Amino acid sequence: MIFQPCSSSMCLFDKTATLPIIFFEAFIIVGVALSLLFLLKIEKRILARFFIVSMGIFIFEFFTHPLWWNYKMGNWAYVYRDVSWLLTIGWAALILVPTIVIDKYLKGLKEWKKFLITLISITLLGLIGETAVVNLGIRSYSPEAQEVIAGLYIPFLNIPWAAFYYIPVFMALIVSFYKYWSLVIDKQLIIPVKNLKLLSSFAISALGVFLFEIMIEAMVTNDRLPSWSYIYRDVSFIMTGGWVAIIWASVFLVDKLFANFNLTAKFASYVIVATIITLPIEAFLIANKFRLYGPSATDNFSGYHIPFTTIPAEVAFAIPFYLSLIVSFIGYWMFVIYNKK
Amino acid sequence: MKIIKSIANIVILLAALAATGFVAFFGILVMTCGKSSAGVLFFIPLIILIIFFISNIRKAIFGKKEVVSENKKITLDNNQQAVLDYINQAKNRGMADMEITNALLGAGWKEDFIADIYKIMSLK
C-alpha cells in the first residue's frame, strides 16, 4: 500500500462532538445560509465571492493548522487533519458580510479607509468567533503557540491577548485575497503599468511578508544565523528579507515581462515563479539546519518528500499556498496605488 | 517560430501535468487522514483551479494579436498588446480617448507609444 492511513496525533485527535458543539455547528450552517441570502439581495455573483473567501481561509488554515488545533467537531466536520470545512465557511461568512456591506454602502470612501473599517469590523467579529470556539472546547493552541502566548489571556473571554495581533493579520490577508479576486469577478478595468513603482511595491511586499512571518514564527525556527540579524524571537531580517526579495523580484519580473497578462495569469505566474525560486532554497535551508520545523509541524508530516530533496510534502504544498496569500496582498495594494483616480 | 511554440506548448503541458499531479497527491494525503472524505470539497476545485490557471497563462502567451491591414502585418509585443487591450476595454466602457490617454500617461507610458497604438488600431 503506497499511502498508509495517517497515524500521527494530528489525525488521531478527539473528534467526538459534544451537544453544545453540534448546536454551534448547526448555528454556523444556518448563519452561513442566512448571510448568503442577505448578500444575494445586495450584490451579484455571491457564490463566486463566497468560494474565493473560503479558498483563502482554507489556504491559510492548511499551512498554519499545526499552530491552532480544532478538535471535537465530529468526523463529518474535517477536511484535512484538524482543518474543518464548517469553521472555514463560518469564517468566510463572517468576513464576507461586513466586507461587501462596507464596499456597497461606503462606496465614496478611499479604498484604504474602507479596508481599515472592514478590518476593524471583522477583527471584532473574529474575536467573538475565537471566544466561542475556545470556550466550547473546539480551539486549543499548540505548545509552540502557547510559548508565544506566554500565559497572557484576556480575562473572562479566555482567548490570548495575541489574538489582537493574529486575527487582524489573518483578516488583512484574507480580505486582500478576496479583493484581488473580486477585481476578476467584477471584470474591473485594470490599467497596464509601464514600470512598477519599486519602492512602494517593495514596501508592500516587506509589510505582507513581515507581518505574516511574525504570526507564524512559532511553527519553524530560523537557526544558525548571525545573532545580530534576529529582530523578534527567531525572526531574522536576513531570512525574512530574503523571502521579501524573492517575492518582490517575482512580481517585478512577471509585471515587466508580461504586461499583457490578465490578473489570473499574473497571479498564477507570480506563484509559479516564486515557488520555483523558493523550493530549492528551502531545501538547502532544511538540509543545512537553518530552518527547523517545530514538533507540532513535524508531527503533521506524512513522511513523504519531494523527490531528490529533503522537503517534506506538506512544506512543498505550503509554499505555493503561502505565496498565494502574499502575492494577492501585494497585487491588490499595487492595484489600489495605480488606480487611485 | 513554430518550433518555439511547440516547445512552449510542451513545457506548459508538462507544468499542467506536474501541478495536477501535485494536487492529486495532496488530495490522496487529505483522504488518507481520518475517516472523512470531505477533502473532495477542496481537492476537486483545486484541480479545476490549476487547469484554469494554466489555460489562462497559455492564452496570455499564445493569444497575441496580429493586426493586418492591406499591405502590413504587425505582431504586437507584450506591452503593445497590454495597452491595446486596455484601450479597447476602456472604449467599450464609454471612456473618451483623452481620458484613456491621460490614464496611460499616468501609468508611465510615453505619448509616442500610445499614439502608435492608436495608429495600429486604426489599421484594422
Image (cartoon, helix red, strand yellow):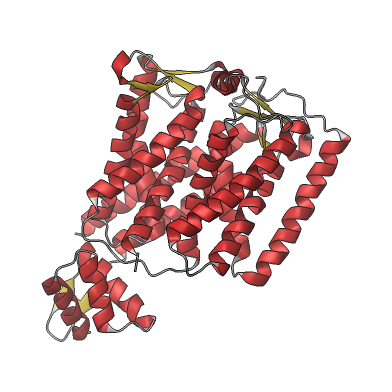
What is the quadrant of the N terminus of chain A in the image? top right
Q: Is A29 situated left or right of B90 in this image?
A: right
Quadrant that contains the C terminus of chain A? bottom left
Closest to the observer: A155 or A146? A155
Q: Position of residue A52 (x, y in %)?
A: 56, 54
* Residue A39 coordinates in the image, percent (x, y): 66, 65
User: Residue at the spot x=24%, y=70% of the render?
Assistant: B104
Quadrant position of residue A281: top left
Asked whether B7 or A272 is in front, the reply is A272
Residue at left offset 53%, top offset 67%: A106
- Residue at image x 59%, y 34%? A163
In the rendered view, does A64 fall on the left or right side of A37?
Answer: left
Among all residues in the image, which is located at the extreme right? A19
> From this viewpoint, which residue is outermost toward the front?
A155
Q: Is residue B58 left or right of residue B74?
A: right
Residue positioned 23% across, 48% down in the render: A198
